[in-house]
Image (cartoon, grey):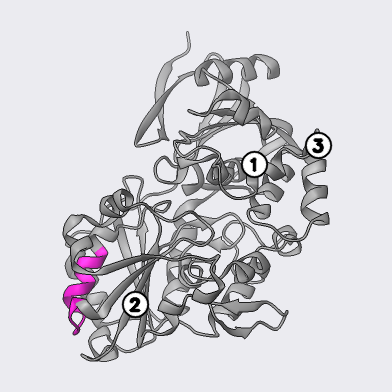
Amino acid sequence: MGQTQQIDIAFGKGSLPIQVDSDLADWWVIRPEFEKAAAEAERRFCEACDYPKGCEPLADLVSPDDRVVIVTSDGTRPVPNHLLLPWLLELLPVPDSQVTVLLGTGTHRANTSEEICSMFGKELVGRVDILNHDAYDDKLNPKVGETSSGTPVHLDRAYLEADKRIVLGFIEPHFFAGFSGGAKGVAPGVAGIETILRLHRAELIAHPQSTWGVVDGNTIQGEISEAVGCCPPDFLVNVTLNAEKAITDFFVGDYRKAHSEGCERVKSSSMVSVPEPFPIVVTSNSGFPLDQNLYQTVKGMSAAARIVSEGGAILVASECSDGIPDHGDFARLMKNGEGPSDVLHAVYEEEPVLDQWQAQILAGILERSEVDVYSNLPPQDVSSCKLRPVDDFQESISRRIERVGKGARVAILPDGPLTIPYLST
């Protein structure tokens, strides 16, 4: 008789249990080598700011008269702002009245006051001005330059007019930029919509080097780096996180050097090799906050797609409390025609539009695999995006195993795109 054990995968602010029966399938649970939470994190943060990578110490960089902008991610990213911001404010030799926090929303909707309180805490919200970036207001995003490929670079006026620019963020594998963090905090984070659309144009997304864990030769990372070079940040604070979203290390200093070191660390812990593809891959979308909508859930699907067999099945559990969502062009693009080829045709034929990059990636996944989605979305919303809604995740896994046959090889990514599997051959 086989053994049954429970595997919990990230889902919303909790987890979703999966019963794994060794009699039914050959299960592979694939996880990164998460590090322990950093001991004495505040002390280590202060030391990192005193001895940064490739630039002056923070205390020497910022003068008492400087107006400082601190850019950080919006509520879709688990940046520990409630820790980093107060630590940073204690080190800055300027009064709180000279500090503005700018939320790098990119093309996302503005964060609500409730979300901002949740991200920072009420005390911090009362101490400093916290603004949502607005990519769609041209007056707020003047042009500061152009990349060699002709991308106009528009950046938030609040960022441009500051005397010193500090960017916060965290580093994890990214499905087309290689890794998050670094220059991405500025572009697309606080870039204008014209710049963002050009940075995500279809030919860059389609490039084979524009993928998980690749920096050198990554066309998107190169374009972002050029754009941010028009007005680079003065100081970068990036962190790495474990499965509990606790800080494991700090990468602080010059935005290129500190980020590069962090990427190497994440690559060594998050990239996991497997010997051959799987007919079934089960994944999460890393839980809250990344699994707030279907648009973001493409990241979990993309991680699974790296190791799924041609014609195989991806099963993803993602809460989607914020819907598809109802803003942007992702839903409209995914509803094009009957199949994924129609979506790709629309992406390449239309003028660049918001969210086309996510639709392009999802359509590519659907051309070679089926995708089951367990979420809180109405079934018709899921199926309208050419995905298969399921109301019982365990049963859906069992049905997929039955189709393949007893002993089917099944991969499980409990932490979703925090783990990036790849084929060793």
Disc 3 and disc 1: Cα gap in Å? Answer: 12 Å
Magenta residue check for 86 = yes
Q: Is residue 277 left or right of residue 31?
A: right
Q: Which residue is mark 2?
A: 69
Where's residue 74, x and y in %?
A: 40, 57
| Mark 2 secondary-structure assignment | strand
Is label 3 in a helix, a strand or a loop? loop
Taking the magenta stretch, the answer to whether it contains residue 103 is no
Q: Which residues are magenta?
A: 84-96
Q: Which residue is mark 3?
A: 337
Q: Secondary structure at mark 1?
A: helix
Residue at mark 2 to residue at mark 3: CA–CA distance: 45 Å
Tell me the residue that label 1 is attached to: 331
User: CA–CA distance between discs 2 and 1?
Assistant: 34 Å
Residue 158 % position (x, y)? 41, 77
Q: Amino acid at mark 1?
A: Ala
Dividing the picture into quadrants, the one containing residue 40 is bottom left
Q: Earlier in the sequence, mark 3 or mark 1?
A: 1
Classify 213 as above or below 296.
below
Give the numbered dot on residue 406: none
For residue 81, what is the image quadrant?
bottom left
Residue 288 position, x and y percent, is 39, 42
Residue 280 visible to an observer of this rendering: no
Residues tagged 2 and 3 counted as in contact (Cβ below 8 A)? no
Residue at x-position 59% and y-position 56%: 212
- Secondary structure character of the magenta stretch overall: helix
Amino acid type, callout 2: Val
Q: Is residue 161 above or below residue 17?
A: below
Q: Earlier in the sequence, mark 2 or mark 3?
A: 2
Q: Nearer the viewer, residue 297 or 123?
A: 123
